[in-house]
Amino acid sequence: MEDVKPEAREYQLKRLREMSSEEKLRAATRLYWSARRLKEAFFRDQHPDWTDEEVYQAAKEAFMYARD
């Protein structure tokens, strides 16, 4: 499924090719932690009674075992 315009995809690929390994690693790390924060927000919304530690552990396990 093509969800990105061809021009945008070409720009993304060009930019990725121009990035150093360090830049790619930093971008991947930022993406990972952004996804973790979103998962934590989801768990907080679904389980308002959970403590911060319970939310943190649930998000950690969701990423560790790649489950919802």
Image (tube, helix red, strand yellow):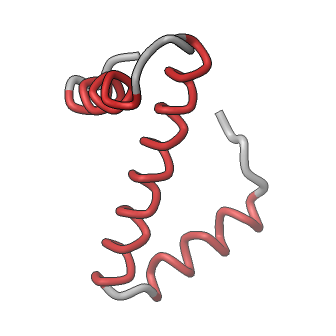
Q: In which quarter of the image is the N terminus?
A: top right
> What residue appears at the point 31 percent right and 29 percent down from the top-left corner?
53
Count the numbered circles shown.
0
Above or below residue 50? Residue 5 is below
Which residue is at the front of the view, 2 or 18? 18
Which residue is at the front of the view, 14 or 40? 40
- Please provide percent x and percent y for residue 67: 33, 18
- Please provide percent x and percent y for residue 52: 40, 31
Horizontal side of 17 relative to 56 (left or right) equals right
Above or below residue 14? Residue 54 is above
- Please provide percent x and percent y for residue 27: 43, 69
Horizontal side of 6 relative to 12 (left or right) equals right
- Please provide percent x and percent y for residue 23: 38, 82
Above or below residue 3? Residue 40 is above
> What residue appears at the point 60 percent right and 70 percent down from the top-left corner?
12
Which residue is at the front of the view, 21 or 57? 57
